[in-house]
Image (cartoon, helix red, strand yellow):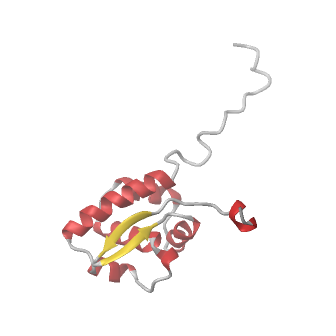
């Protein structure tokens, strides 16, 4: 295995058609950073994964395809998708986001620290 291969991190990609063009939807740190820069907080991004909306669909397609280094804006993307394409894209977005995001709030799955004074009082 080449030296660089050992340090490579693989992120799931999902095929999605935007207009007549094939793209790969990927929610990596670049995508989440773009969403943050656009003003979205973690909880809002998690909500986007479960709520269908025309605006959030275009926003998530824009962020999830930024790794392709295209010049498309959210507006460009929204103008390229009809209602059938919207439904297809929304399903792909939901799957991709559900697999990329932990649905618990940060820190919720960490073990609870027990107070040493009450530890043996059960």
- Vertical comparison of 8 with 98: above or below: below
Question: In what quadrant of the picture does the N terminus appear?
Answer: bottom right
- Looking at the image, the residue that sits furthest to the left is 83
Please tell me how many numbered marks the rendered image carries.
0
- Looking at the image, the residue that sits furthest to the right is 116
Residue 84 quadrant: bottom left
- Vertical comparison of 62 with 6: above or below: below
- Looking at the image, the residue that sits furthest to the front is 1
* Residue 39 shown left or right of residue 53 in the figure: right
* Residue 50 shown left or right of residue 105 in the figure: left
Say which of 4 and 48 sits in front.
4
- Looking at the image, the residue that sits furthest to the bottom is 71
* Residue 54 shown left or right of residue 99 in the figure: left
Q: Position of residue 13 (x, y in %)?
A: 47, 63
Say which of 12 and 116 sits in front.
12
Q: Position of residue 33 (x, y in %)?
A: 56, 69
Residue 74 quadrant: bottom left
Q: Residue at x 75, y 27 (%)?
A: 115
* Residue 66 shown left or right of residue 75 in the figure: right
Q: Position of residue 25 (x, y in %)?
A: 43, 67
Residue 6 quadrant: bottom right
Q: Position of residue 122 (x, y in %)?
A: 69, 13
Q: Residue at x 72, y 28 (%)?
A: 114
């Amino acid at each position: 295995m080449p030296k660089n291969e050992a340090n490579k991190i693989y992120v799931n990609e999902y095929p999605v058609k935007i207009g007549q063009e094939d793209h790969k939807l990927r929610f990596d740190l670049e995508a989440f950073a773009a969403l943050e820069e656009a003003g979205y907080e973690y909880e809002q991004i998690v909500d986007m994964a479960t709520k269908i909306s025309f605006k959030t669909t275009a926003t998530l397609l824009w962020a999830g395809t930024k790794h392709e280094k295209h010049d498309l804006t959210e507006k460009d993307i929204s103008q390229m998708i009809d209602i059938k394409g919207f439904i297809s894209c929304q399903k792909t977005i939901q799957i991709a986001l559900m697999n990329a995001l932990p649905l618990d709030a940060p820190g919720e799955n960490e073990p609870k620290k027990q107070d040493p004074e009450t530890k043996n009082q059960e």
